[in-house]
Amino acid sequence: MVERNSRSKKFIDNLLNFQDVKDLELCDDQGVKVSTHTYDVLNISINKIKEKYIGLEEATKKVDFFAITVGIIMHDISKSSIKRNDGILSHSQMMIKNPEYIISEVYEVLNLIEKQVGYTLIKDVRENIAHIVQSHHGKWGKVQPETEEANIVYLADMESAKYHRINPIQANDILKYSVKGLGLTEIEKKLNCTAAVIKDRIRRAKKELNLKTFAELLEVYREKGRVPIGDKFFVLRSEETKKLKKFVDKQGFYNLFMKNPLMEYMIDDKIFEK
C-alpha cells in the first residue's frame, strides 16, 4: 500500500540532499551552524503550532505542514549560494535590498526538485513556500508575513535568533587557556572564534565581578577554577545554544527533518498536481 505522503517525503528527501541545503552545515552564523538554526526554527514552529491548536490533526485544517517544512528548510538557503558566489550583500541585506534574488532562488530550487522527483507542486503550495522564505524577517525585511505558515516561521526565526544564535564560547573556556600562557591569537585558533567574541566574554565576566582588569579576572579564575560568565539572560542563551548544537550534531540535520512529526500528516493529493 502506497503511503499518502510518499511523494511529500521523497520531495523533502531530495531537497535535504540538494547541495545548497547540505552546505548550510558549512555556513556559520555567530558560532552556530545555519543548519542547526534551521532545525531550531522547525522545532520552535512545531511548538507554536501545538500551543495554538488542539493537536496536530486539528492544526492540519489551518496550517500547511508541507509548505511550512519546506519553507523552513529553504528560508536561509541563500546563505549558501551567497557564500559560494562571494556575494557582496549578506543574506539579511539581500532580504531588504534584493528580495527578487531570494524569490528567484526559491523557484529555481523548487523547479529542480520537481524535475528530480517527477511531479509538480500545486500553485498555491508553491507560492506559500516562496512567501514563507521571502517574509521570514518580518519587519526587518521588505516583505511582511501574510499567511499563517509565514507568520509562524517569522516568529520562530525571531525567537531562535534571540535565544539560540550566539557563540556558546564562555569566559571559562578562554581563561582555561590564558592560565597556560596562551595569547589572544592562539586562543582564537583553539576555540575557533574571533577576537571580538573573546573580548566580549571577558568583558561580561569582569562586569559580573565588578573587576577592571583582565589580570584581576585571571586571578579569580586561578583561585576558584571558574568565574561568572554573564547576566542571567546571557547564561540562558549560552547554555541553551550549547545544548542545541550538541543535539543537532548528534541526531543529524537530515534525520531530524525526515523524522519530524509534521511529516505523517502530509497528504500528497493536497500538495501535488494530479
Image (spheres, helix red, strand yellow):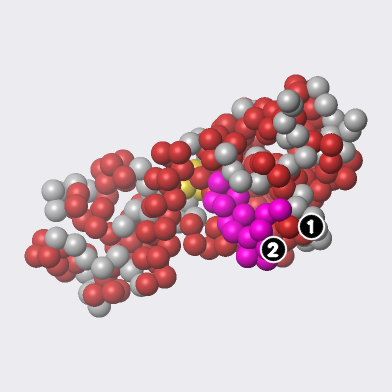
**Which one is nearer the viewer's eye here, 97 or 106?**
106
Residue 189 location (% of width, % of height): 31, 41
Q: Residue at x 44, y 50 (%)?
A: 244
Outermost front residue: 1
Residue bearing mark 2: 53
218 left or right, relative to 207 = left
> Mark 1 belongs to which amino acid?
Lys
Asked if labels 2 and 1 touch by Cβ distance under 8 angstroms, the answer is: yes
Quadrant in which residue 3 is drawn? top right
Examine the structure image and report whether residue 56 is included in the region drawn in magenta.
yes
Task: Find residue 181 and name its label.
Answer: none
Examine the rendering and report whether any part of residue 227 can be seen.
yes
> Mark 2 belongs to which amino acid?
Tyr
270 left or right, relative to 196 = right
Q: CA distance from mark 1 to mark 2?
A: 9 Å
- The local crowd at label 1, few if under 14, some if 14 to 19, many if 20 or more residues have their Cα within 10 Å, is few
| Quadrant in the picture for the C terminus | top right
Q: Which residues are magenta?
A: 39-57
| Quadrant in the picture for the N terminus | top right
Task: Find residue 62 and name its label.
Answer: 1
Q: Secondary structure at mark 2?
A: loop
